[in-house]
């Protein structure tokens, strides 16, 4: 069995990652997935969460927002709306986004798009969970 697979993460503005991984963990519409090499083919929606890229004993973490993942036995491709390393996350901006979303959700007004505010809150919380001080 192959020990690693190829992982590519593409966002609208860059190729975020292109390398080998022994395991990849992320949040999807099918729940939290841990993908090892030789996984059965799968395509599923990505939900906001932490992307963990394992390579041997090393683990890299990034904030992964919405998108799609295609899994093939030796190749995993993620097309994401946005993906950020912890050092690239602006914690103050994410905190403002969290406060804005929480305020909208607490207003309980017909003007508020609840699903949109909930999605913004999830993105902010994922970023805050990884942001450096
Ligand atoms: P905001 O309301 O602050 O714009 P958002 O969740 O609506 O947050 P997105 O639509 O997910 O933002 O992202 C738009 C772009 O801004 C992406 O390129 C993303 O990487 C970047 N971005 C958003 N929030 C942050 C942050 N806190 N730190 C670094 N980059 C961010």
Image: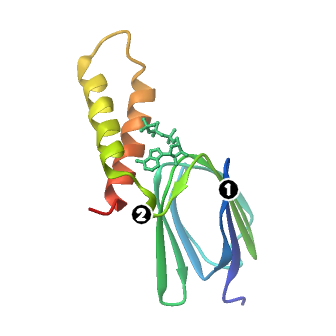
Using residue 116 as the reference point, say whether residue 125 is left or right of it.
Answer: left
Relative image position of residue 20 (x, y in whole percent): 67, 80
Image-based side of 132 in relation to 113, left or right: left
Q: Crowding near pointer 1: few (<14 within 10 Å), some, many (20+)?
A: few
Q: Which residue is mark 2?
A: 86
Q: CA distance from mark 2 to mark 1?
A: 17 Å
Q: Are marks 2 and 1 in contact (CB under 8 Å)?
A: no
Q: Under 8 Å from ligand 1: the CB of mark 1? A: no
Q: Is mark 2 within 8 Å of ligand 1?
A: no
Quadrant position of residue 15: bottom right
Above or below, 117 relative to 122: above
Q: Is residue 72 above or below residue 12?
A: below
Q: Residues within 10 Å of mark 2 (few under 14, many from 20)?
A: some
Give the residue pinned by disc 1: 14
Name the N-terminal-most of marks 2 and 1.
1
Please say whether residue 10 is visible from this viewpoint.
no
Dividing the picture into quarters, in which one does residue 133 lie?
Answer: bottom left
Q: Look at the image and tell me in which quarter the N terminus lies.
A: bottom right
The residue located at (30%, 46%) in the rendering is 92
* 72 vs 116, nearest the viewer: 116
Identify the residue at image location x=29%, y=43%.
Answer: 95
Residue 80 location (% of width, % of height): 62, 51
Question: Residue lying furthest top in this view?
Answer: 110
Give coordinates of residue 30: x percent, y percent: 55, 53
SS class, disc 1: strand
Q: Residue at x 41, y 55 (%)?
A: 89
């Amino acid at each position: 069995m192959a020990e690693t697979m190829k992982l590519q993460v593409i966002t609208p503005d860059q190729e975020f990652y292109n390398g080998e991984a022994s395991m990849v963990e992320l949040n999807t519409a099918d729940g939290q997935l841990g993908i090892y090499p030789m996984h059965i083919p799968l395509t599923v929606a990505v939900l906001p969460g932490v992307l963990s890229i394992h390579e041997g004993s090393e683990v890299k973490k990034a904030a992964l927002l919405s998108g799609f993942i295609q899994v093939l036995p030796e190749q995993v491709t993620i097309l994401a709306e946005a993906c950020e390393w912890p050092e690239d996350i602006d914690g103050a901006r994410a905190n403002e986004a969290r406060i804005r979303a929480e305020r909208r959700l607490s207003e309980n007004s017909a003007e508020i798009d609840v699903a949109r505010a909930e999605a913004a809150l999830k993105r902010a919380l994922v970023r805050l969970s990884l942001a450096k001080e």
